[in-house]
Amino acid sequence: MPLAPHKISLPRAAGIAPIYRALLLLIALLAIAVPLLVVRFAPPVVPQHRIKQRAQRVVPQAELPPVEPVTYRQLAPQDAQTFNAAVPFSTDPNPAARPFRLDGAADDRARAIDCMAAAMLYEAGDDTLGQRSVGQVIINRTRHPAFPKTICGVVFQGQERSTGCQFTFTCDGALLRNRWSETAWKRARETATLALTGQVYKPVGYATHYHTDWVVPYWQASLDKVAKVRTHLFFRWTGWWGTPPAFRRAVSSSEPVIPQLASYSEAHRMGAALLDPSNPALDGITSVGTLPTPVAQDNNSFLVSLDPEMSADTFPLLATRACGTRDYCKFMGWLDSSHTPSTVPIAPQQIATMSFSYLRDRSRGYDKALWNCAQLKRPDPGQCMKLQVLAPVARQTEAFRLETMPGSRVTVPVSSGAKPTEELTGVRRRVEITAVPPRPAPTPAAPPAR
């Protein structure tokens, strides 16, 4: 029996067709929309050739490593952070640096502290941990022969360039645009003082470079990554130049004046005033024609009668201008011109009356001015020279005894029956005795009466 043909319900088929058409339309829309959404919201793809590191070169010990100007790769902050996170930390030991204690006169120390405080504030903000890490890098650089040998010299290295300075705040106008509060400045100075008087920030070891994690400096490839503090990454040179023996250079205590810090620092403000040719206090010593000349016997020695009307603070400027470019120079001045010698060597009596002295010896990193504080009052005893007060030599025929004065470390001759004179505060007395006669034997005591 033949089968009956299958009947198709046309109304049902007609109802399904719109569903298929809508489904096809939805698929087509998704095929267009999904790629657009992926392109719009997917994280950016970093071209690998833009952050490809150059080959690392280990500088040999016989060659001083170069200090490159700070220039950065053209990367967005997120790309830089991604790249920096992928840079591994060095697996070599990271020993803590030796404690550092800055010497020098009070004004030099004040300038160093203020340079350090400014770097701490402008590089790490008002954050003690970040400031300590920055301060340790500055100290490490000061000890390293590749950098200047003063705190201010390290901080303001390259400040004359509009770009490429070592610390960007020194050349990008930040000191003029942004001023920190007095409270923040005081805290930074306290942190800087601790760093310059022996406090060590151990985590960064002997790092000499650092940068924030949202930038990639070109020098990064040639250094070893050793630490991270907050958002700062710290690096040291590879090979011998990153080891403790490389940080043995003697540090100079003669800190330069930084006029840019005058708004913060009294020490730099006073120094800048002395360096200003229009300063009336410098009248009479700014002209080359009025500078003193060295003595005939020694081209590096100056014996000068000082003008009593001059400010004692200007004496170092007069001395440095007289010494010029000499690597070794002695400048000695007297307020009383009747005591000024004309030849060298100088007699002890003339040394005792000297009012001011300046000695420069660049081979030893020495550059220091001292005042006779018995004649010229100074705010810091460290600026006072140690005077030689000459006592008259006792005649050998005169009976006398040697007696140590109470509270004094010196022994002075005292004539029979005389009393020791009072020791001058802050002055070491030097007594020259050509001969000391034997002390007479004590007279035996009378026997007691019976």
Image (cartoon, rainbow, N blue to C red):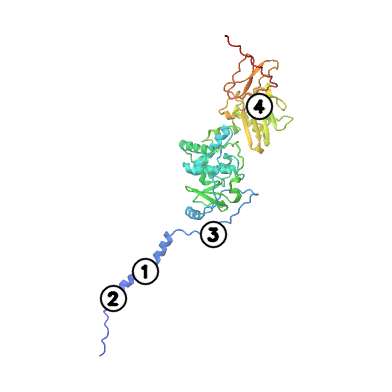
In this view of the protein, can residue 30 be seen by the observer?
Answer: yes
The image quadrant where one finds the N terminus is bottom left
Q: Nearer the viewer, mark 4 or mark 1?
A: 4
The image quadrant where one finds the C terminus is top right
**Picture coordinates of residue 180, whole percent (x, y):** 47, 39
Residue matched to label 4: 333
Lower position in the chain sequence, tag 1 or tag 3: 1
Q: CA gap, disc 2 to disc 4? A: 118 Å
**Picture coordinates of residue 372, whole percent (x, y):** 62, 25
Q: Residue at x 38, y 69 (%)?
A: 28
16 w.r.t. 56: above or below: below
Quadrant of residue 285 within the rendered picture:
top right
Q: Residue at x 53, y 57 (%)?
A: 50
Residue matched to label 3: 49
What's under tag 2, amino acid-wise? Ala
Q: How many marks?
A: 4
Q: Residue at x 70, y 15 (%)?
A: 397
What's under tag 4, amino acid-wise? Gly
Q: Which mark is residue 27?
A: 1
| In this rendering, position of residue 223 left or right of residue 231 | right
Q: Nearer the viewer, mark 1 or mark 3?
A: 3
Q: CA gap, disc 4 to disc 1? A: 97 Å
What's under tag 1, amino acid-wise? Ile
Q: Which mark is residue 14?
A: 2
Lower position in the chain sequence, tag 4 or tag 1: 1
What's under tag 3, amino acid-wise? His
Lower position in the chain sequence, tag 3 or tag 2: 2
